[in-house]
Image: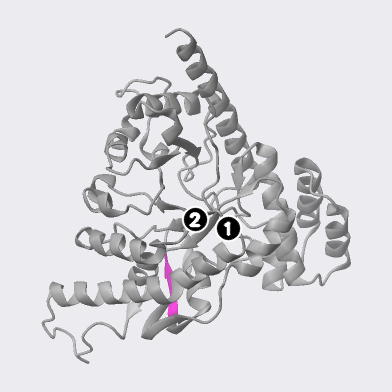
Amino acid sequence: MKLLTHEIGSLAKPPWLVKASAGTPLGESDIEHARTWGEKVGVDGHEELVEALERGNPDKAELGRWASRYALRLLESAGIEVVYDGEQQRTEMYAWAVDHSDGFAPRGTVRSFDNKYYSKSAVTDEPSLREPYHNNEFEFLQSVANHDLKIPVTGAYTIAVWSYDEHYGPQSGRIGAGHGRAEELTARRSFANDLARNVIRPNLESLIDLGAKWIQIDEPGASTEADELDIFVESFNESVDGLDCFFSTHLCFSDYDLFFPAIEQMHGCKQFCVGFANYDSRELGTSGADRPGYEVISKFRDLPYDPILGLGVLDIHTDFVESPELVRDRILYATEVFGDPERIHVCPDCGLRTRSWEVAYDKLRNMVEGTKLAEQALATAGATT
């Protein structure tokens, strides 16, 4: 029995890219990072990058492509089967989409989590796609990746809920105008669906035309408002309906019970990537009592269209490196609950951008090793039945 492993999305940008992009002088440790990791994960021609960094004033666009090569090789050398580049050439998942769309105006910077910030915008007119904003990135990665690719794309609902609304909602011009929740929901629905039709869907169509086979719709904002889950579902369906591609969605940390029964209508979603390790025990064991963070997975099993579960087995909010045995037991519990190992993929809880490359690499290697241990255990169990 083979269990597929894949990444989720983000990976920290290397210091030499961060500093060069900000116009900050590089130190010897930054150059050594490029040299060491180039050797460690097998980046062909990395000496060229090291020489460019030593000379100073490297081309920023070329540095982004080098960072993509490094991130791909990091994931591939860790043994991950389906990869992307950790979003090395993007700014931030919200800002990247908004910056390539019309109908928005910047409104400053706000904190998200872990002392991370993003630039928040307001929708000021019906949004539209100025240009497909993942094409160049995807074409480059196609040319250098050794493993299959999965493209993360920020979803319509998250863009809507993370934006200020200065277009769809009632614009009274005064505080306390008495607008009801029904009006807010109507405005949010219109905004999210316009984003799905005018921004997300044409972007997906463009990627599919270039050969994309698997696209992950990232929706970290999906459960921000419990009474808007039907809007999330509707905007997802509006984005993907009728398109020929394997579509998955990533649901960030949440009370996952909230998603039911709304997501029963997401028939175009072939896989749900869900973070469980953040809520789980670090002790070994494959019983329900041993795996408290995975209690809700039976609800994903029972969805009417039999989607695959992208099983989060790495806690991305800590430097704790899960042992292969802990990964194994989390997988074995999930396969027992699902009763069908083919409906389980193995992945981190979320993107690893808040962790150093050293920690991320160790976590991912142990995830791959733990997956192999689970495969062996399943094969042994199958041989004795």
What's the magenta region?
107-111
Q: Quadrant of residue 178?
A: bottom left
Q: Residue at x 75, y 65 (%)?
A: 63
* Residue 19 colored in magenta in the image: no
Which numbered disc covers residue 212? 1
Question: Label 2: which residue?
Answer: 245
Dot 1 surroundings within 10 Å: few (below 14), some, or many (20 or more)?
many
Q: Quadrant of residue 132?
A: bottom right
Count of numbered labels shown in the rendering = 2
Q: Which residue is drawn at 29% across and 57% down?
A: 223
Q: Residue at x 81, y 44 (%)?
A: 39
Identify the secondary structure beneath mark 2.
loop
Magenta-colored segment: predominant secondary structure: strand
Q: Tell me, yes or no, if residue 246 can be seen here.
A: yes
User: Could you say which is closer to the camera, residue 255 or residue 356?
Assistant: 255
Tell me which amino acid carries mark 1. Ala
